[in-house]
Image (cartoon, rainbow, N blue to C red):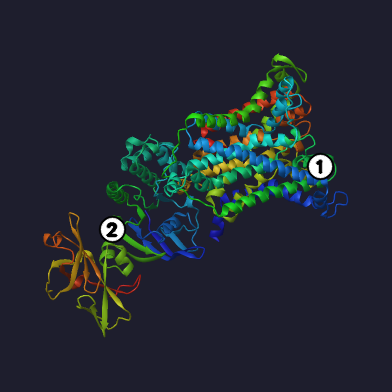
Amino acid sequence: MASVEITGLRKLYGDVVALSDINISIPSGSFFTLLGPSGCGKTTLLRTIAGFHDQNAGRIAVDGQSIEGLPAHRRDVGMVFQDYAIFPHISVRENVAFGLKQRKVPASEITKRVKDVLDVVQLGAFAERMPHELSGGQQQRVGLARAIVIRPKVLLMDEPLSNLDARLRVDLRAELRRIQRDLGITTVYVTHDQEEALAMSDTVCVMYQGVIQQAASPLDIYLHPTNKFVATFVGANNFLSLDRSGGQFALRSGGATVLDADGATQDLVCGVRPECVSVKAGEVAPTADEIAIPARLSDVSFVGREMEVVAVTDHGETVKSLARPDPAIITLAPGSAVTLVVKRSDLAFFDDGDAGGRFA
Amino acid sequence: MTNILRRFDFWTVVTGVILAVLALLLLFPIVRVLMLSFVDADTLEWTLGNYVEVFTRNYYLKGLKNTLFVGVLGTLGACLLGIPLAFFTARCHLWGRAWISTLAILVLVAPPFIGAYAWIMMLGSNGFITNFFEAIGIETPTIYGAHGIILVFTLKFFPFVFLMTQTALMAVNKSFEDAAGNLGCTPWQCFTKITLPLVFPAISTGAIICFVLSIADFGTPAILGRGFRTLSTIAFAAYRSELGGLPTMAVTVSMIMIVISMLALLAQRRILAKRRYASSLTNLPVKVRLTGWRNIAVHSFCHGVVLIAMLPTLVVVYTSFLKTNGPVFVGGYGLESYGRILRTAPEAITNSFVFAIAAVILITMFSALISYVIVRRETAAAGTIDFLMMVPYLIPGVVMAIGFVATFRTGFMSGMSAAWLLILLYFIRRLPYGVRSTTSSLRQIKPSMEEAAINLGAPPLNAFLKITIPLILPGLIVGSLMGFITAINELSGTLILYDSGTITMPVSIYLAVLDGEFGLAAALSTVLLLCTGVCVYLVFRFTENRDSAFI
């Protein structure tokens, strides 16, 4: 078990910056997730740790030892691949034993360790099967077993669940986390699925355009996004325009004054999560710690557990709401007048712009 | 510093070795040929005189004209047979389709010079067809000269056009034709305006292969020419007459041949550059069921073409079992011809096998390494190697062999024996077959396979041997078999490099034909055909798409 320190890591493809000044500190035994849209650099970062790419600058240390100069086969980091990469010409047992044989582990110990790890991933009965006889989920378990049996200092996982169907993904997610906790192995996990990232991780690191946007616990990421990108990418968000007069900011839709900030140097927008917006039929007056925005119903979809409401304010801004199903709303005709009610404490403010920072 | 050290890994070394080998065996001989063509044979000074001579003397100009004449008409003939054949097999329900493509493949891989001399046995001055018609008082046209060469080229090279066009036709999305029909095209308009342009890249690739091979072919004009000279026979004759001196005229003629091949390839690339059609295979073409006289006509055409193309092979095998007394056929059947090859030319058989197998071992090793570098390493060196792999296709065997002589029989590298020169010649000329097949195999393997092995602690060489090689083995075997077939059938380069101890089967056959020893030639050819046939069978066993493995 080992900690991972990455400092000042840079990676260029020609003129394109793939990774820009990456600094990460991962405590021993923790589950660290790189989350971001495709092309954000998360896979590049993972593969650089594994040694499949050369970095242009920076240091990668495992347990204080620099590994950035070592060739990939001497880094002692286990990797689980998105496409499983199970060797198709040898059996499950030989796949799992491959890394141990490379390390010249005695045969008797190989037999024992392969058996143990296959039991851990619940594939004990499949040792003699060939890879093509296994389902996708089973192949990925072989991939995991093969990576952890060598007892690597760090486990790297590159979107390991993305090729599986939704149901299996959720099951295997829990199992991965259980095995990771039992072994206490430091894990770097790459995904573009925010739900997966929030459900599994100790730390979620959101990346965008080769830059780390925020690295924090799932709860912090969700409740206190540091900028507009994180607020949008993790969970959904509504952004409402603000009008400024002096130090006072008021919602353009509805006109409620929501912020008193003399220090603001640029334009701000107001973010509010869909689940914080409640929709009431007709006109409703807000309490002191609430604001109310008059709007017209645009669309309601009832999906069972909850209802998704889309409303358009008098200034033409679209607001989404996610709430417990309310028959009074679901039966309303599109175009009906509604009031959107939000608690003042649920509002967050950001600098305007693509990745505008959070205004504290 | 660490980065520089890391880049200097196993595959960097391999890339360096490959480049060095290609430079020594491929580029160096070609450059020697190029340089010698600018040297005066007597004064040893730089001169343009050789080229002036080639472009002013009638002997050479006639050869150039002849070469282009039989090359263009042979290619045209191959297209006239190959395109309809491809269309019928791809679009009509045809009885015996697998049989037709198998015969076409056999024609393709049969030793190239067998066709020429088998036609002599049929239509030559003492051929059995000639004699048959003479007996009933009809004079048949002679096989010797340009039209005979064109006939042999047509029947020998049409499988390239056929197999490439067929593959392309089967991949044309039927929706295109449906759409054209829906917009008001008649079936014939659909074919000429939509289908034909879509498969044009494949047709032109097949045609260009025919043309380049026709230009390079030595055996056919040498056997059938009778005074009708092409550049390859002229280069060979010039080399023979210049023995002892500098082969300047031979290399100058060789340069002309290289330039013609290169111009043809460049022209085709230029035409194709604007035509790249990506096609998704959602709607496969359906085959029509022909009836009545059309059905009979199409079947007769398809089976007729491949049977006539196979005729030389059948004649050769048949002749080999005729009773002979010396060079004379005495009527009846017997195994005397086989007895004679065992008595007079056993070393030709062993030599052929030893050289071809040695070359194939080298081809297999280098194919595996080269294809890995080409597919997995995105370096400038990898791109260069990929490009160099096209060069041997463009260099006629006579030219490559003259380059070998000019490079390895002079100066500090002159110590190599004829056997080694032949092995290295076969290796460098047939290497692209191995690389092509292995490369397409490797492209199907995801890079994560090797990365997983390396991640688990395997050094690059170990990962390559334990994971990559087993996964590309089918492609490697097919490529090696193709290399073997083409190496054991090599004639033109061998004729220049062989000496008394290194005679091969194709050379023995060629010499026997020149001596009129048709029984002996037939028996040796049958042995060659047999091992070619075994290899073709093995290729069929190891490949899923049998037709495209051969082109």
Work out how far the residue at label 2 is from the one at label 1, CA to CA, in angstroms.
80 Å
Chain of the residue on which disc 2 is drawn: A
Nearest the viewer among A208 and A108 is A208
* Quadrant of the rendering where the C terminus of chain A is positioned: bottom left
| In the image, residue B403 above or below residue A207 | above
Q: Amino acid at mark 2?
A: Leu
Image coordinates for residue B22, horizontal then vertical, percent = 66, 47
Which residue is disc 2 drawn over?
A198
Rendered image quadrant of residue A201: bottom left
Farthest top residue in view: B332
Q: Tell which of B210 and B11 is nearer to you.
A: B210
Q: Residue A101's spot in the image, x, y percent?
A: 45, 41
How many numbered marks, from 0 up?
A: 2
**Is disc 2 surrounded by few (<14), some (14 to 19) or many (20+) residues within 10 Å?**
many
Residue receiving disc 1:
B238
The kind of residue on which mark 1 rests is Ala
Q: Nearer the viewer, mark 2 or mark 1?
A: 1
Q: Is residue B443 left or right of residue B236?
A: left
Within 10 Å of disc 1 (Cα), the crowding (few <14, some 14-19, many 20+) is some
Residue B321 horizontal side relative to residue A272, left or right? right
